[in-house]
Image (tube, rainbow, N blue to C red):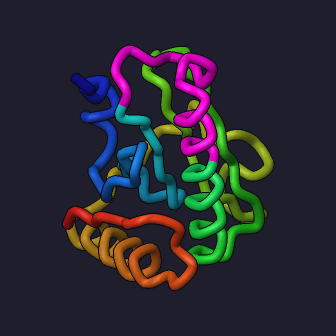
């Protein structure tokens, strides 16, 4: 049975589920930042997924990246899977701007600034409207508010 790593559960908020992945919002208001985690038990690396799940994972990741870039007007999307501190397979999708506080450096190591309840609610609503309402969505998006 799939279980989310405790560090991901602590640092993120559930946004919704795609066919393979759960989608989580990183609790850092400095960057629009989603994390995709395949709902497959005991997976650390993408090559451990079945061939079909590898394709689905990359498809979902690409779709989320494209939507985040459109929604937030990204100058660049940073997509990464490090796993050094959290071994469970997960991809970070971080919207970057040439004028953000960390540009052009990576966001890693920068202390997070937690969302306020009001901003968190607004972010969830923004994601819900933008991702649910997209007419080219290739799968059912189930939002959790």
Q: Nearer the viewer, residue 124 or 136?
A: 136
Question: Where is residue 143 drawn, in percent x and y?
Answer: 28, 66
Q: Is residue 129 left or right of residue 136?
A: left
- Counting labels gives 0
Q: Is residue 129 left or right of residue 6?
A: right
Q: Is residue 47 above or below residue 128?
A: above
Q: Does 47 appear in magenta?
A: yes
Residue sitting at x 40%, y 51%: 19
Q: Is residue 89 left or right of residue 102?
A: left
Question: Where is residue 36 drawn, in percent x and y?
Answer: 46, 44
**Quarter holding the N terminus?**
top left
Question: Where is residue 72 drawn, in percent x and y?
Answer: 59, 74
Q: Nearer the viewer, residue 143 or 123?
A: 143
Residue 55 appears in which quarter of the rendering? top right
What stretch of residues is rendered in magenta? 40-58
Q: Is residue 41 left or right of residue 61?
A: left
Residue sitting at x 25%, y 71%: 121
Q: Does 81 appear in magenta?
A: no
Q: Nearer the viewer, residue 6 or 138?
A: 138
Q: Is residue 36 above or below residue 38?
A: below
Residue sitting at x 33%, y 51%: 114
Residue 142 appears in which quarter of the rendering? bottom left
**Quarter holding the C terminus?**
bottom left
Q: Looking at this rendering, what residue extends furthest in the front direction?
A: 52
Q: Is residue 13 above or below residue 80?
A: below
Residue 86 appears in which quarter of the rendering? top left
Residue sitting at x 42%, y 51%: 28
């Amino acid at each position: 049975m799939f279980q989310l790593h405790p560090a991901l559960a602590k640092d993120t908020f559930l946004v919704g589920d795609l066919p393979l992945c759960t989608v989580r919002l990183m609790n850092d208001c400095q960057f629009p930042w989603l994390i995709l985690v395949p709902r497959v038990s005991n997976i650390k690396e993408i090559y451990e997924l079945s061939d079909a799940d590898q394709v689905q994972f990359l498809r979902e990741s690409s779709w989320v990246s494209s939507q985040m870039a459109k929604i937030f007007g990204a100058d660049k999307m940073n997509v990464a899977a490090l796993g050094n501190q959290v071994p469970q397979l997960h991809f970070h999708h971080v919207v970057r701007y040439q004028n953000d506080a960390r540009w052009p450096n990576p966001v890693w190591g920068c202390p997070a600034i937690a969302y306020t309840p009001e901003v968190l609610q607004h972010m969830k609503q923004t994601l819900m409207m933008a991702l649910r309402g997209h007419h080219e969505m290739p799968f059912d998006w189930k939002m959790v508010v």
